[in-house]
Image (cartoon, helix red, strand yellow):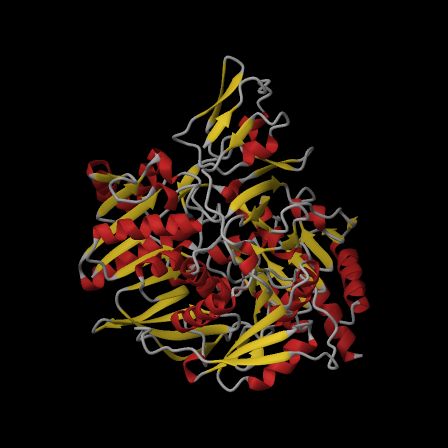
Amino acid sequence: MNIIVCVKQVPDTTDIKIDPKTNTLIREGMESIINPFDLYAIEEAIRLKEQFGGKITALSMGPPQAETALREAVSIGVDEITLLSDRKFAGADTWATSLTLAEAIKKIGNFNIILFGQQAIDGDTAQVGPGVATHLGIPQTCFVRKIENLENNKIIVQRLTEDGYDRIEMTLPVAITVIKDINIPRLPSLRGKRNAKKAELTTWTAEDLGLDENLIGLSGSPTQVVKIFSPEFKKEGEKYELPAEELAEILYKKLKEFGK
Amino acid sequence: MIKVIRDKCVGCELCIKSCAYDAIVMKDGIAEIDLEKCTLCGACVTDCSFDAIIIKKSEQQNLNKDQHNGVWIFAEQRNKEIAPVVFELLGKGRELAEQKKTELVAVLFGYKISNLTNDLIAYGADKVIFVDDPVLEHFLDLPYSRTLSELAKKYKPEIILSGASVAGRSFIPRVAIELQTGLTADCTGLEIDKESSGLLQTRPAFGGNIMATIVTPNHRPQMSTVRHKVMDSLQKDDSRKGEVIKEKIDFSNLNDASKYLGFIKDETQTVNLTEADFVISGGRGLKNKENFVLIKELAETIDAAIGASRAAVDAGWIAYSHQVGQTGKTIKPKVYIAIGISGAIQHLAGMQSADYIIVINKDTDAPIFRIADLGLVGDLFEIIPLLKKKFLKGSAK
């Protein structure tokens, strides 16, 4: 079972501080981490490898420092790492990013399953997984909470829906994006950390992938950001700091007003 | 590529603060961008008060945009029922179509669903294109994307909107790649730009910490997935007339062996979280999984749906399907009760548009109080049992 896990290095958007005076976010000192959802994809890849053998390659597109995220993936249990890094990739939207990753996956070759986290916490699009699958012309299921079975080249997965879970069977090779329910990611091991230091990093540029400059990065991106602004939140209403009994009474009356 | 115009830069350092990637430094009083770190996200361009930073894109061949006409809504159905977000999209689509002086088309597919076309017209569609095929009975990514792509290639719409549902966020990206056009995920605002007559698509990003407006200048159709409960649907008008067109798609060369095997109901959610009028959510303040039962019991007492913060889900107290927030569900109940939730932006992004927000939190400085209509500063472990008692007494009367 050869598995490719796509990972992204992101700023830690969950730990953002807001300037209380201007109500804007303080971006200074934000840490770079592996996209938290990708940790579930890495974990699932390791579990599949433990069961079926094979090899796990972690693939990332990003600036040179994204190497840190890939080495962290090795410390958790990934075997090989490839970084797609080139100034020409910068400014890519999900269309151009998917194409670039898909070309690299073709170059890596010989894969059975491609795993993604459900979305990255900076862009929050969830579009790169299905985008890569489309460029590769392979089936996909997104928002998977469980791999039920895998045998004879058939995989059965459970996909989150609005009111439950769909069971879907697909024929390999496939692309899957996973949600948090799928597993509990393990932490890096001591041996893994040693491996991470030694692991050989493959780095590919646009030229290595034979990609036309007009199809990648900013030039290859159909969408364009024209404005960025801070979200507005509505103002505070009534607030009470009273003994619990009185607070419970206020709440009870309020809920009664709403017909409860 | 990105460039600092040295004559315009005054060295105010606003751009340094705006950069999430730590890619800008001051050198001799002028901003310098580290191209190794810069992702061309454009935040500094917007924040610079002196127009001193520009991002330039190499010129693209212009498509013949005039060939593309009409606003399309993907009329998602599940179990032969139109998804509620579709009616909201028809409301918004109606407005966009009128501004563009074009038609609003609902695109419906499934199996034995021809009875659903009337409702789509009653809620604002001028036309319904529908494909009735057993292959489309349940949502599978490849047949769905094939169908929408083929129809879009044939009719050339200018705009395609879909709900940011599981189906929409799964297969619409495939359609965008196949049509070689842009797609903006999870939009909360859509309008027509008066100057370019293009679609301005606004969405939260960065965990809900920023809003970004995105355009698709040179590709058609312009495509967006749109959050549920942010657009308003029109009043149903059964007297509206519209055209219904039946289409057929050839799946013979699809080369997809995927099968729909069945459905497992989510037993942990007795009241549908996204559609519920009352939602009670618990967060880190509950302290452990056992205590989270308090939320479940209270929800049962007042017949509310159960929500949770990211912290509670990550701690394993409750399934991800209950998570409210930027990376979970976006909801707009009549009443939202946040208990023991501090109110990280990522959570607010999923519930701030609730009609009435009630907050119970021990910490008077918790950020969630900023958006509360009714804030109660106190210990949830005292308040909830007291409240429950009142309800039990009330019902006994």
User: Can residue B309 be seen here?
Assistant: no
Q: Quadrant of residue A43?
A: bottom left
Q: Quadrant of residue A135?
A: bottom left
* Rendered location of residue A215, percent (x, y): 37, 46
Task: Answer with left or right where residue B114 lies relative to residue B175.
Answer: right
A6 on left or right of A192: right
Q: Quadrant of residue A216?
A: top left
Task: Please name whichever residue, A151 or A206, is drawn nearer the observer in this view of the structure.
Answer: A206
Res A193 visible: yes
- The residue under the point 35% across, 62% down is A176
Above or below, B97 relative to A89: below
Residue A94, given in percent of the width and then of the height, sits at 43, 50
Q: Residue at x 26, y 65 (%)?
A: A173
Measuring from the top left, give residue B158's x and y in whole percent: 56, 60
Q: Position of residue B23 (x, y in %)?
A: 46, 29
Q: Is B80 located above or below residue A220 in the figure?
A: below
Q: Nearer the viewer, residue B119 or B167?
A: B119
Residue A60 versus residue B150: which sits nearer the camera?
B150
* Quarter of the rendering occupied by the C terminus of chain A: bottom right
Image height check: is B31 above or below A26?
Answer: above
Relative vertical location of residue B236 with respect to residue A43 in this rendering, above or below = below
Count of numbered marks: 0
| Image position of B277 (left or right of B209) | right
Q: Quadrant of the N terminus of chain A?
A: bottom left
| Residue at 78%, 50% in the rendered image | A237
